Amino acid sequence: MSVTVRVPAKVNVQLAVGGARPDGFHDLANVFLAVSLYDEVTVSPASSLTITCSGPDAGQVPLDRTNLAARAAELLAARHGLAPDVHIHIAKDIPVAGGMAGGSADGAAALLACDTLWGLRSTRAELLSICAELGSDVPFSLVGGAALGTGRGERLTELEVGGEFHWVFAVADGGLSTPAVYGEFDRLTEGLAVPAPAASPALLDALRTGDAPSLAGALANDLQPAALSLRPSLADTLQTGTSAGALAALVSGSGPTTAFLTKDEESAGSVAAALLASGTCREARVASSPTAGARVVGA
Ligand code: C5P
């Protein structure tokens, strides 16, 4: 018997970052949107906890206990006095260390898959509390759709989305470490008054009405200067996509994946082709949003 869960990537349409807190984290107003790039996580009974990963970038995925999927199995098992004896297979399609919550997605997926495999029937609230323990972005991977994350990003308010948005994601060579990008944010804002993060009413309105040009005008990522400082070549990628007709471009989360909002699916195809031809990215992926969070697709 095995259980497979499909889980989406995310893009942050607004990432407002406050100053560093005493615990090292930053208060956020983080507007997440789930996008149609998916990992699939399959768990099956085994004699001990093991992980394998397949997909073109599988080599970059840690297969030890630092993988959030393994930590999810361990945390859930510990809460129920069980041994986390499962084999976890990750079919990886979300860019690795790309700012699209790929690792968080696998954590949420493994949690739901183990809960189903072990017949635990945890409540949504129980699963969300384990997700929050695993990482700031993990609760959103479970919920999907669109949501505002406050606190360090883990406290979610679900948001209404009135239409479908089309995106291109330009995948860069190599990843960026999230702590390193936050560290660079701290360096760049040292001595400055960093305002308390707040969700933009114009952006929430654009999501509610499903209006792509309005959303394009409201996209904002406070981590973008830090990501560009660590990876200056991303500026060329952003410029290439906007010149090719994207409504707007921004770094996805902590990067280095860059996100391009387009007016429709056809435009997404031509922006993706231009990005690939430019040589300013390794891969260009077309996707749409919103999409559902982690879901059991096979048991
Ligand atoms: O919560 P998560 O483990 O995903 O966070 C990874 C790292 O990103 C943290 O160790 C911290 O350096 C940084 N972070 C932050 N403020 C947040 C979320 C993450 O500084 N709100």
Image (spheres, rainbow, N blue to C red):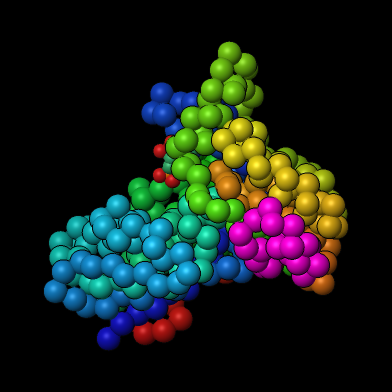
Q: Residue at x 61, y 33 (%)?
A: 229
For this view, does 124 lie left or right of residue 81?
right
As drawn, 87 above or below 13:
below
Q: Residue at x 22, y 62 (%)?
A: 77
**Residue 214 vs residue 62, the one in the foreground:** 62
Q: Residue at x 62, y 41 (%)?
A: 15
- Asked if the stretch drawn in magenta spans residue 172, the answer is no
- Asked if the stretch drawn in magenta spans residue 282, the answer is yes
For this view, does 4 lie left or right of residue 168?
left
In this picture, which residue range is highlighted in magenta? 268-287
As drawn, 148 above or below 272:
above
Q: Quadrant of residue 117?
A: bottom left
Q: Is residue 56 visible?
A: yes
Q: Position of residue 165 (x, y in %)?
A: 74, 63
Q: Position of residue 178 (x, y in %)?
A: 48, 42
Q: Residue at x 62, y 17 (%)?
A: 193
Residue lying at the far top of the rendered structure: 191
**Residue 33 vs residue 36, the one in the foreground:** 36
